Amino acid sequence: MRDITKYTRDYLNDDFEKVAVYYRRKKVLEILNTYKPVKILEIGCGTSSIFEFYHDYDEFTVVEPSKEFCETICKSEFYNNKITVINDFAENSYDKLKDKTFDFIIISSLIHELINPDILMQITKSLSNPNTIIHINVPNENSFHLLWAKEAGLIKSVDSLSKTAQNYQRHHTYNLDKLKKYCLDQGFSSFEEGSYFMKVFNNAKMLSCMNSDILSTELLDGLNKLTEYFPKNGSEIFVNCRIKN
């Protein structure tokens, strides 16, 4: 069982995570604005839910195990009667979700943290129909900063769990090929994939560069756009998939 209290504290204390969240959300919103779903399930929201940024929905459901995160989003000015917030693990929430219909399910920065993500994936499958789009994103083991660290001799392998990863209670690493294969094995087929935001250093060093005015907002935006040239080497990867025919 994950220690959600510790996770919440560590998450809130990582100042660079706010930057990662910004670019992660930017990608999710880009995809939402492309497909324009109206019945959305967000599994895990952190300190802010996508409903605060995407408003063209008829129903929006959030499942989040952190009580503090749930309380925060329920105080949002965008919280309304079309939103349902369930304070629990998705694995425990099937009975509250099974009678709902979803055309878009967001599983953002989560499956790598689960000891057995298969459980969540099978619940997601049971909540999906052939037209449901499932968006999954995770950190990328082929991120530029990890490849550079490996070539510099600072780490032995890009698929090993760093101290930061272990502190965040992560259990798995993925690259695009591994993530697509995992989804396929779980009964989904991906139809869209990519990465976003190039990191050149780990979180602590990236934050130090920002605090020293080495990295400006413009340069951060440029790092995000660099994945157009290096599509498999952003700091995070995503797949959009549906139930396999």
Image (spheres, rainbow, N blue to C red):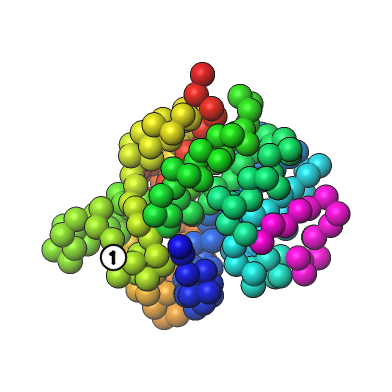
- What is the secondary structure assignment of the residue under circle 1? loop
In this figure, which residue is indicated by the disc labeled 1? 162
Q: Main secondary structure of the magenta part?
A: loop
Is 217 contained in the magenta span?
A: no
Please indicate whether residue 98 sits to the left or right of residue 196 in the image: right
- Residue 47 place in picture, x, y as percent: 62, 67
Quadrant hosting residue 118:
top left
Q: Amino acid at mark 1?
A: Ser
User: Residue at position x 30%, y 70% from top?
Assistant: 163
- Residue 63 place in picture, x, y as percent: 64, 54
Against 161, residue 103 (above or below) is above
- The answer, for residue 180, to whether it is visible in the render is no
User: Residue at position x 33%, y 39% from top?
Assistant: 178
Please indicate whether residue 114 sits to the left or right of residue 42 in the image: left
Please indicate whether residue 3 sits to the left or right of residue 91 in the image: left
Quadrant hosting residue 105:
top right
User: Residue at position x 73%, y 39% from top?
Assistant: 100
- Residue 182 place in picture, x, y as percent: 38, 37
